[in-house]
Image (spheres, grey):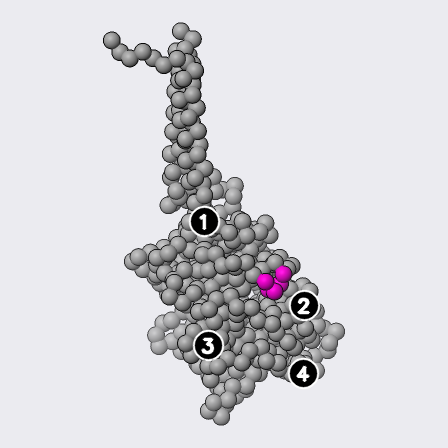
Amino acid sequence: MRTSNSIDGGLTWTPSSVLYTASVNGYVEAFVRAPNGTVTALVIVNDGVTQQLLAARSADGGLTWSLTPLSPNSSASTLTAASDSALVAAWVPIGTNVVNFARSTDNGETWSPAVTATPPGQDASAPQLVVSPTGEITLAFSGSTGVSLAVFATSSTDNGLTWSVPALLSSTASAENPLILLADNNQPVVMWNGTRVQSAARVLAAAAALPATGADPLPWLLAGLLLVAVGAGARLRRSDRV
Amino acid sequence: MGAERPPVRARSLILAAFVGLILSLGAASAAHAAPAAWAPAVDVSPGQPGREAVSAVAPDGAIIAAWTSDSSPDAAILFATSHDDGASWSAPVNLSGTGAYDASPRIAVLDDGTITVVFAHNFTTVQATTSLDDGASWSSPRTLSSPGVEAVYSTVVTDGDTFIASWSQYTGGILYALDVSSSSDGLTWGPITGRPRHRLRAHPDGHLVERQRRTD
């Protein structure tokens, strides 16, 4: 696996340098270049038995690379810049059908412990990440409703430590291969293929006062019970005064 | 006779315990955040299947998208635009000619809004079509790859004022060789060699990066 670099719009290219010598094969899943010039790539290398996911990092324009293992057996990974020095990555450990997530705050030199971002049993694959200017991370992925292929999205507001219940975005009989981007209003938009090409846009906070279909009803039930309790307390105090 | 009512202080403690229980249950449930609110899915390709969708955000904030639409035995590249952050989409525009198998689109947009879609034509050549009016009209597709040489795996990137298209050439049975072409307007394409350096504007990262997958 070799890389070459151009800093003049493709007019000239550096001699290729070795990123990794895989025993069977390997391929680069994603590249990100930080403003300080550090290049980080997610690389999958195959030794004939497992597909190891590595974070490859170069601080010298691709001449030399350092490698950090992220997952011992993985496929379908994605990498996105979260800020000038922070990166977020997601991947699917083979055989788990969930999406794992990790974050680096030093341009890929070290990574947080992996967090499982999607529920078990959802047959998750094809993760795609985007980070809003406020730091909210949105993860779109292919999954299963139990009946058909579908596209879901989940989000995190604490740098990936916890994730929301995935929202079902697609409405067709079959949907897969999501891609995600930030719209001009800084809200994520997800597009996917399937029975038709569809898209879904995140609703702005001001328009999201009502829970979306499928929202957890427990908080609303508890709020109602609390109101009942407050009302009962008020009646109790009135009866005490009689 | 009924049981004697507990004193006022005891009843107040019972009420406080009940309210506390309610609040603690509420806090526990909040640990499982509800799904974020998303608008219902909208069709970008109403009434027709699509695959290989790609998209980008134009300088004016519009979301632009292209995808492959199959109509066996042919396939075409379709294009649509959203001017309301993905809430709705324009009617698809067909970028392909008739009787062709066009697939695997890649899309890029310059700082001045010029849009180019690069795609594979009939499994053998790489073509590009360009819009100077935000996708309302498109140039006739231009062939970028060399005649008689099978070209595959095309892509296009931009540094803001120039498109760089690249693809792999399938020659000699097994050899893949990278070829590139550039254009400052999406209408005239040519080799990068000889480009005046002062025309180069640094991309935010200053580099162009090509990603390829090989299994040989």
- Label 4 crowd bin: few (<14), some (14–19), many (20+), radius 10 Å: few
Residue matched to label 4: B193
To which residue does mark 2 refer?
A37
Q: Is there one chain holding both mark 4 and mark 3? A: no
Q: Secondary structure at mark 4?
A: loop
At label 4, the amino acid type is Thr
Label 4 marks a residue whose chain is B
- Most extreme residue toward the right is B198
| Helix, strand or loop status at disc 3 | strand
Is the Cβ of the residue at disc 2 closer than 8 Å to that at disc 1?
A: no
Q: Residues within 10 Å of mark 2 (few under 14, many from 20)?
A: some
Q: Which residue is mark 1?
A: A164
Hey, what amino acid is under mark 3?
A: Asn
Q: Which mark is residue A46?
A: 3
- Which image quarter holds the N terminus of chain A? bottom right
| Chain at tag 1 | A
**Image mark 2: chain:** A
Residue at 51% over, 53% down:
A160
Q: Nearer the viewer, mark 4 or mark 3?
A: 3
Which residue: 57% across, 51% down? A135
Q: Nearer the viewer, mark 1 or mark 3?
A: 3
The CA distance from mark 4 to mark 1 is 50 Å
Q: Is residue A199 above or below residue B198?
A: above
Q: Nearer the viewer, residue B53 or B136?
A: B53
* Kind of residue sitting beneath label 1: Ser
Magenta span main SS: loop
> Is B116 placed left or right of B88 in the picture?
right
Q: Indicate whether A203 appears above or below A37.
A: above
Is circle 3 on the same chain as circle 2? yes
Highlighted magenta segment, given as a residue range: A106-110
